[in-house]
Amino acid sequence: MSRILTISSWVCRGHVGNAATTFPLMRRGHEVVSLPTVVLAHHPGHAPAPARSAITDLAAIGRDGLGSPRPHPVDAVLVGYLADPAQAVAAADIVAQARAMTPGLPLLLDPVAGDAGRLYVAAQILEDIRTHLLPIADIVTPNVTELVALMDADRTGRAPQLGDAEIVHLARRLGPPVVVVTSAPPRRPDRMANLVVTPDSVTRIETPKIDVHVHGTGDLMAGLILSGLVNGDHVVPATATAAAIVHDVLETTRRLGDDEPAIVAAQSRFIRPLGQAEVSEL
């Protein structure tokens, strides 16, 4: 049984950050070591300035979690939302410790920083992600806004207007060998799209668009992609399966009228999604 370390935010109510990935990963058969970067009462999108508690020594908690009272190696690491610039360095140190126990383990970096042309993290967090985490990541899963911000933060407002060619160009300059660009431009307005970009291929993965707006789908998508990779899938089928599952979660959320992803109600779909994503080469 594989064990995955996830480093991201935790919310008391709702499903974003680690609260969006821990249960789905467990439901798919993984043990999860869930390390919070910050604890929030709820997602700030529900109401501004939720009560929060900072995690002031991420590195020490991570070291102890992996190494005490005996070594507890993991098979993969996911780094998501960082609440403080120093946490990028701490996360990189934790990855180094995990790789000392399990050489070559994959790091999936989900650089949670913004959406729709707007950023909601400090510029220094982006800089430290760029400096300390991008160079050691095997796969990175930015949305278009985050992709642009990591390359040139001054151009972030242009992100919603970018087409496929410029997105692919930026993704290949980012550094990691595999970039999955989420919330990419779809071919039709009734679709949702992701682009899987490698040095020698570009694959579009689309699912029907669901008319519902909730937070946490990017976190869920990243966790599901890493689950597929740990289970031995290539990145394209791993992403296609993840997209199909996210679609089913959103469809269940719409049907129930929830304001959070219906992760518990849709849990059977983590094993068998109802539909299939459409996969095409660009």
Image (tube, rainbow, N blue to C red):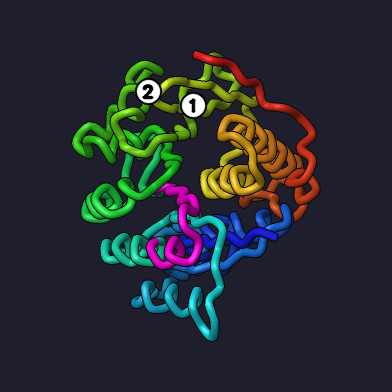
User: Magenta span has 92?
Assistant: no
Task: Tell me where residue 128 appears, x and y as whole percent.
Answer: 25, 54
Alpha carbon of mark 2 to alpha carbon of mark 1: how far? 8 Å
Whether residue 50 appears in this view of the structure is: no
**Picture coordinates of residue 55, whole percent (x, y):** 39, 74
Question: Which amino acid, by three-letter code, is at mark 2?
Answer: Val
Residue 101's spot in the image, x, y percent? 48, 66
Relative horizontal placement of residue 101, taking residue 131 as reference (left or right): right
Residue 148: numbered disc: none
Magenta includes 102? yes
Mark 2 neighbour density, 10 Å: few (under 14) some (14–19) many (20 or more): many
Query: Is residue 265 left or right of 159 when viewed as pictured?
Result: right
Q: Position of residue 215 (x, y in %)?
A: 53, 48
Q: Nearer the viewer, residue 127 or 264?
A: 127
Span of residues in magenta: 96-111
Residue under the image location 44 percent in, 55 percent down: 79
Q: Residue furthest left?
A: 154
Number of residues whose C-alpha sits closer than 10 Å to that of mark 1, classed few (under 14), some (14–19) or many (20 or more): many
Q: Which residue is mark 1?
A: 195
Residue 50: name its quadrant. Answer: bottom left
Q: Which amino acid, mark 1?
A: Leu
Q: Residue at x 50, y 74 (%)?
A: 66
**Sequence-wise, which precedes: disc 2 or disc 1?**
2
Identify the mark at residue 168; answer none if there is no mark: 2
User: The N terminus is located in which quarter?
Assistant: bottom right
